[in-house]
Image (cartoon, grey):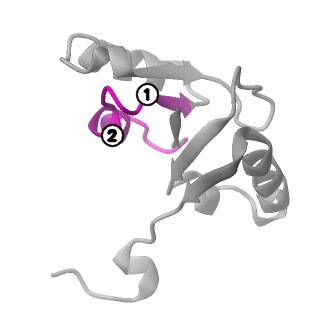
Amino acid sequence: MGMFTNNNSFEGYDVVAMASPDRHVLGLDISSTAVKKANEWSSSLPNANYFNFLAADFFTWQPMELFDMVFEYTFFPAIDPCMRPSWAKKMADILKPDGDCHRPLHEAILGKENG
């Protein structure tokens, strides 16, 4: 199972885009309003059986199973730096031993111009 976390302006578009018969994706957000909004616009899509949205606190949430992959790019930079060791521990706790954590960097972070 793949997982996407995003606790900033969550809409769930990436969750839906990554979901397929070969990859079930879980979108996690602390906001129940964001999860409701994501469910409303995506529930009738052709791949709706391959993703779920869940409102939960990343740091206290306990998944039912470990993940093959975590795709995350907005939560880590948004948390207080003193919480980052807890983030790393939680990532290790929810990933399978051979799982991957993907954190793409935006060009703006790298100092490159768009285009």
Lateral position of residue 76 relative to residue 16, left or right: right
**Left or right: 105, with 90 as reference point:** left
Q: Quadrant of residue 80?
A: bottom right
Q: Is residue 23 magenta?
A: yes
Res. 45 image quadrant: top left
Residue shown at 53% from the left, 32% from the top? 1
Circle 1 SS class: loop
Report x, y in % for residue 37.
36, 20
Q: Residue at x 43, y 37 (%)?
A: 10
From this view, report whether residue 99 is shown above or below residue 109.
above
Q: Does residue 74 belong to the magenta stretch?
A: no
Q: Which residue is mark 1?
A: 24
- Type of amino acid under label 2: Met
Q: Residues within 10 Å of mark 2 (few under 14, many from 20)?
A: some
Residue 102, horizontal then vertical, whole percent: 52, 59
SS category of the residue bearing label 2? helix
Considering depth in this image, is 43 or 70 the residue closer to the camera?
70
Question: Are circles 1 and 2 on residues that touch, CB within 8 Å?
Answer: no
Q: Residues within 10 Å of mark 1 (few under 14, many from 20)?
A: some
Residue 76 location in percent, x, y?
A: 63, 58
- Observer-nearest residue: 96 or 112? 96
Number of numbered labels in the structure image: 2
Label 1 and label 2: CA atoms lie apart by 8 Å
Q: Is residue 108 above or below residue 70?
A: below
Q: What are the residue bounds of the magenta stretch?
A: 7-28
- Give the mark nearest the N terminus, 1 or 2: 2
Residue located 34% across and 42% down the image: 14
Q: Position of residue 32 (x, y in %)?
A: 54, 19
| Mark number, residue 18 | 2
